[in-house]
Amino acid sequence: MIDIDILKEEFKRRFGRDGIAYVAPGRINLIGEHTDYNGGFVFPGAVEQSIALVISPNGNDMVNAYAVDLQLAASFSVNDTEGPSDVNMRYVYGVVREIIASGIAVEGFDVVYGGDVPLGAGMSSSAALECCFAYALNDFFGGGRLDRMTLAKIGQATEHKYVGVMCGIMDQFASMHGRKGSLMRLDCRSGEYEYYPWHPDGYRLVLVNSCVKHELVGSPYNDRRRSCERVASMAGVETLRDCTWEQLEELRPRLSDEDYRRACYVLGEKDRVLAVCDALQRDDYETVGKQMYLTHEGLAKDYEVSCVEIDFLVDKARQLGVTGSRIMGGGFGGCTINLMKDSLYDSFCSEARQSYKDRFDVECQIIPVVIGDGARKL
Ligand code: GAF
């Protein structure tokens, strides 16, 4: 759990007064990976791991920010049109500029921030950071006038314009809309969403962090998105959400093998999300788990966003009798998400840890999932 007192004390030590605290969480995603920018469905939930900040206006036009975990300080004017070059600070700068662009007069402020969302673990530490700032600035300078979806889009625009990751809306949506004990099904085309209370009797969700740092900035993530857009445009549809298997097969001779396989993954994932929604109505977690393994297969073989360490963890999960396991989030490292019977938990933890250590000489990190609330003032 994040320790707000540490941030408050650091704020007081640096700036000599008290500030107000805000928090926004990271997320998990049960199923529906790389479907958000294809207009499809996702199934995320906010987690307890969060980013928090302590903020107070300073009466001039400067933002003075200090990232506790990174021990990184930066200052820039709210009117600066270039912004800092450090990637971490560009998230802060981008949100400030996007909030201003939305019509809110952001003035100078001092801020200290930090959190416990593991970096590069695929749990959306960057979305948590964006959403924490977006929520705080909207509350502080805008009187809360922007709604949560608009704030999520401000976070997404920050990634696109200031960091260069052409992400979808899932992570920021989840960080803004999370609700304790519920997952959410978001239709990324219409923006409609529903809460699904998540109390899987006899089962639990557990993350295993491979500690292979996933890095979406400048990564092949954008290439995947471009492939999808190419296929959609050749099929004459806006996104792959509207492309059928028949259309894809018709196009196949004109597609590169890579684009074809990527599109196959996305079309398959659309079907899997719907199968999972259906299974959840019946509390049929065995079917949910099977779909998760199938998603991993697609992400590893067709979408090519897994890595040896993650494949090892998924194979190990299968051998140990875990109900469902797959890579979670953007890919290229980070965590697996595992759905398992409660009774398996202890033996799974010790065996997964030991075998991972034996194989890679690295300690993996086991993270029990607790579904928490979205961005808020503390
Ligand atoms: C990353 C992105 F930020 C999301 O928008 C989403 O595409 C995800 O990868 C894959 O499902 O987390």
Image (spheres, rainbow, N blue to C red):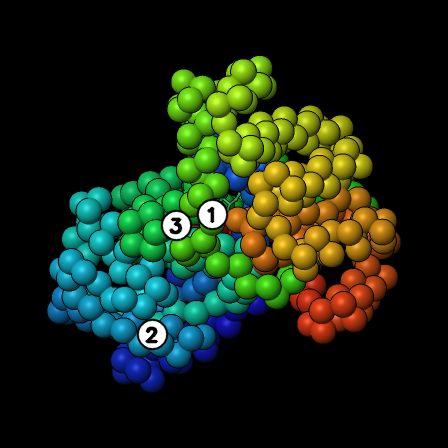
Q: Are marks 2 and 3 in contact (CB under 8 Å)?
A: no
Q: Residues within 10 Å of mark 1 (few under 14, many from 20)?
A: some
- The amino acid beneath tag 1 is Tyr
Query: Which numbered disc, 2 or 3, marks the residue closer to the eye?
Result: 3
Q: Ligand 1 near label 3 (Cβ, under 8 Å)?
A: yes
In the image, residue 246 sits, relative to residue 239, either above or below, namely above
Question: x and y percent of residue 68 in the render?
Answer: 41, 76
**Which element carries disc 3, helix, strand or loop?**
loop
Query: Which numbered disc, 1 or 3, marks the residue closer to the eye?
Result: 1
Answer with mark 1 or mark 3, whichever residue precedes in sequence. 3
- The amino acid beneath tag 2 is Tyr
Relative to 202, 21 lies left or right = left
Q: Residue at x 33, y 80 (%)?
A: 12
Answer with mark 2 or mark 1, whichever residue precedes in sequence. 2
In the image, residue 131 sits, relative to residue 352, either above or below, namely above
- If the image is split into quadrants, where does the N terminus sit? bottom right
Relative to 258, 13 lies left or right = left
Q: What residue sits right under mark 1 in the picture?
A: 221
Q: What residue sits right under mark 3 in the picture?
A: 165
Question: x and y percent of residue 189 in the render?
Answer: 44, 28
Q: Residue at x 47, y 49 (%)?
A: 220
Q: Nearer the viewer, residue 356 or 192?
A: 356
Q: Residues within 10 Å of mark 2 (few under 14, many from 20)?
A: many
Q: Residue at x 53, y 59 (%)?
A: 214
Query: Which numbered disc, 2 or 1, marks the residue closer to the eye?
Result: 1
Q: Nearer the viewer, residue 283 or 90?
A: 90
Q: CA distance from mark 2 to mark 3?
A: 23 Å
**Which element carries disc 1, helix, strand or loop?**
helix
Q: Ligand 1 near label 1 (Cβ, under 8 Å)?
A: yes
Answer with mark 2 or mark 3, whichever residue precedes in sequence. 2
Q: Residue at x 41, y 59 (%)?
A: 129
